[in-house]
Amino acid sequence: MTDVSLTLALEHRRTCREFDGRALPLPVVHRLLWAAQGITGAMGERTAPSAHALHPLRLVLVVGAVEGLESGVYVADPQTGRLTMTVHRDVRGELQAAALDDQPWIGLAPFMLTLCADFVAPARDFADQPPYGQRGERYVYIEAGAAAQNVQLQAVSEGLGCVLVAGFKDEATANLLDLNTPLAPVLHLCLGWPQIPDGTVDLFSG
């Protein structure tokens, strides 16, 4: 990880759709997870804000090439950092097929973090706020956006490339990730070492 100021990280945040295929070190993956939903306070505060502190997001890892991890799908516990394997095969190609339009970076990224959410609890908790039945869902998307930006800025500090994907078939994607009701996929973050064109200097290498 390179010591990068927040200003510099914001300046260099870009969408990257081409990766060089190298595996990610496991400590880098853990820092990305911490950026998304890491515990930052004694009362359970996290790196991303959550309306009424419901924390409806769940972190699902799609591993293709991460040092020390088998290919497959994992669920992360933000309290302990523990990873639990739920699908024992590489599903990146199937997730690519479940995407809207042609998105080859889903199948090629060595690591993908999928932000999933329980939409039922927020809908119930905010049922008395207009627009009735929709306010809780809106808060979930706001929280997911905050967590996703955190991950993208952490990726910059790690020298990684990242592309956010929100175009996919929800039911097929949920089945591939072995999600149980009421969890649903919200977005993918495809991550890896960027493919650097010849003659280009990588500001964050080393």
Image: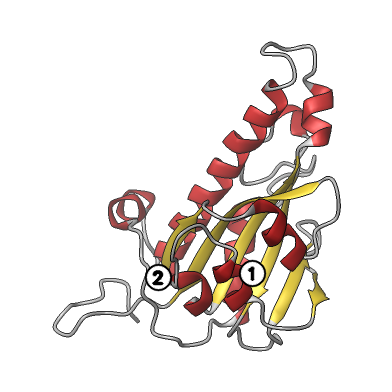
Residue at horizontal 79 percent and vertical 12 percent from the top: 128
| Amino acid marked by disc 2 | Thr
Q: Nearer the viewer, residue 66 or 181?
A: 181
Residue at horizontal 79 percent and vertical 82 percent from the top: 88
**Sequence-wise first label, 1 or 2:** 2
Q: Indicate the quadrant where residue 65 lies.
A: bottom right
- Colouring method of the image: secondary structure
Left or right position of 1 against 198: right
Q: Position of residue 79 (x, y in %)?
A: 80, 56
- The residue labelled by disc 1 is 30
Q: Residues within 10 Å of mark 1 (few under 14, many from 20)?
A: some
Q: Position of residue 166 (x, y in %)?
A: 52, 51
| Amino acid marked by disc 1 | His
Q: Nearer the viewer, residue 102 or 141?
A: 102
Disc 2 secondary structure class: loop
Closer to viewer: mark 1 or mark 2: 1
- The residue labelled by disc 2 is 2
Q: Position of residue 98 (x, y in %)?
A: 60, 64
Checking the image for residue 87, the label placed there is: none
Q: Indicate the quadrant where residue 194 lies.
A: bottom left
Q: Quadrant of the N terminus?
A: bottom left
Q: Residues within 10 Å of mark 2 (few under 14, many from 20)?
A: few
Q: Position of residue 158 (x, y in %)?
A: 44, 70
Q: Indicate the quadrant where residue 33 lies.
A: bottom right
Disc 1 secondary structure class: helix
